[in-house]
Amino acid sequence: MTSSMKAMEFQLHENLVQLQELLSLLDFDPGLLNSLEQAKTRIRTRKYRVAVMGEFKRGKSTLLNALLGAPILPADATPTTAAISRITYGSRERVLLFFRDGTSREIPFTGLSEAVTKLTENGQAISASLKEAVIFYPSVICQNYIDLIDTPGLNDEEAMTRVTIDMLPLTDAVIVPIHARSPFSITEKQFVCQLIRSCSIQNILFVVTFLDQLDEDDYVYEDYMKALAGRIRREVLEELEKRETSSEEMQKARRILDQPCICGLSASLALKAFSSGEKSLLQKSRFPEFQKLLLKILTAGQAEHALRASIGDIERVIAALESENEKKLQEFRKKAARLQKKKRTAGDFFQNLLPQLDQLLENGLQERRDSISRLFPLKNQMMTRFIQGLASVRENTHPCILQVIRPAADAMFSMAAALLSSRILPDLRSSFVRCLDHLAARAGNAGIPWNRNDFDPPLLSCMEEELARAVFRFTMPPCPPVPDLAFADVTGHMTCCVDQSVTELYWLLNDICSEIRERWYPLAFRRLRDLFPEPDTIFSQEEEQLAALRITHMRNYQVLQETAASIQKKNRKLLHTLTEGEQIHDLQKL
């Protein structure tokens, strides 16, 4: 490669790096960055795919074998190729089969013919499920990142033709073999038109095969090639004009056909010459002329392909910038709308804090009443305990009865205290704490930075202070104040005592819950005012950050647009220079 070509590739790589760096700042579709990364890889490796495509029985596989210098691909007088075969450089000869279901396996070189042809039933079965066979071979022509592709013949079978046509978007240049005895059929003319209209195809090389089947006395080689080149140009341009082809495609057609790359050869003679070492036979095959022309096309084609492909990638990125930017702006608008909604929701929360707290406390009211109501069964339990103790009196005397009443009263007191401390008070605490839980959840839903460690403690302290007043006590002496218990209604007196004492505790607990509720209102209001003295400013920082991000984005986007347009202009000038065959001396002037 000339120094000017290397300089051009360096310039292209730098352009893509610059564009990639700017694009990475904008959080656009990752596919755009991937596209630029692939373009960088393409420029670095200059990967170039050359396919041999044409009608069946045109000697495509034999031509490729001659290029490889050995009969690697299966070739036969009848149509044989049934799958794509891609020859790529490899220091070790091997074949990898890639199937349509995503699986792959390696086979020996001897199994290639069975895998890619339809000569046997097994071969037909394998090729039907085969995506491509990749042949790794130490070929000089493939050493510089060039892949050679063998394809099924056109007009053989509809399925085989579709396999070949589907390869066009994945191909950079095409060798079209034309049979010397029936040069350039209608099908071949239509196929060349299709090649020109394919965006990926930039070079076409016409090869007249089976040249050894013509009598040398019947034609002059140079005149034959000139006449055939003129005919190809004329017929293809006429056909394209009939199809109302675009001006860009017509320009591409003239670039390819005004001075078409065409030569004739005998691939079979070349293969014989390689195996026998006969130089005269190799010269007669005209294969060296073809090799020289192909090398010239590949050398220029690789660089031009890298350039055109990178321009295409950049143009696709530029074309996507506006829509991607609109998506990003829409994201900013949605974030701003969400922020405004959060502000309104937060405002409603602050304005309705006390009604919300009142609602939450009201919602838990029945729960607290149910918890306090556990006291009612306690009356029967306490009396049952007392009667059991009274039944143990051995003599109906004052001392014996008094001896039973005192421990029974102590046991009844313990029963009430245990129910209060283990069930009722914990349930009341949980009920009030759940109110704070719900309040914090509502604050969180409103987007408010609610810190319960700051808000809850005063309210919880108030709750504990009130609940500490909840203590069971007998409102009247458990023992009747009479001189002789033997003549007193001990059971009736105890029933009255238990009923009054438990009822008083019931109303005390209800009063405590009401007092907690009343005291929480001013406490909650004061804590809210202390924690959020200016509620409207809660989201100010978030608003400022969003505005700053939008400004930064638009600044980066503007720089990206200007840089991309400048790079595109440079690339097009480079492409024009390469296409016109001018020399690039000073890239800095571009």
Image (cartoon, rainbow, N blue to C red):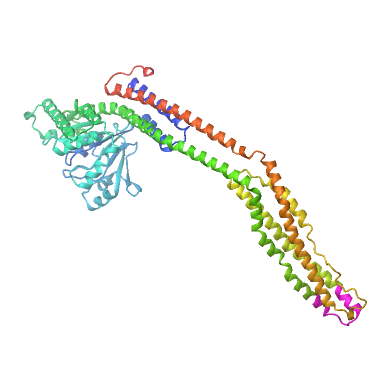
Name the foreground residue: 129 vs 496: 496
Q: Position of residue 73 (x, y in %)?
A: 24, 41
- Most extreme residue toward the bottom is 395
**Residue at position x 43%, y 30% from top?**
20
Picture residue at 58% right of the left edge, 47% below the top: 445
Q: Is residue 401 magenta?
A: yes
Q: Between residue 566 and residue 254, name the one nearer to us.
A: 566
Magenta stretch bounds: 386-405
**Left or right: 130, with 560 as reference point:** left
**Along the viewing direction, whichever of 329 and 68 lies nearer the viewer:** 329
Q: Position of residue 413 (x, y in %)?
A: 81, 68
Q: Is residue 1 visible from the viewing direction of this image?
A: no
Residue 367 can be seen, yes or no: yes
Residue 336 x %, y %: 52, 38
Task: Give the percent coordinates (x, y) of residue 229.
Answer: 15, 28
Quarter in which the N terminus is drawn: top left
The reply to whether the magenta stretch includes residue 450 is no
* Residue at the left extreme of this rendering: 218
Q: What type of secondary structure mainly makes up the magenta span?
A: helix
489 relative to 71, above or below: below
Q: Which quadrant of the figure has residue 315?
A: top left
Q: Nearer the viewer, residue 436 or 167?
A: 436
Q: Is residue 85 left or right of residue 550?
A: left
Label tally: 0
Quadrant location, the C terminus = top left
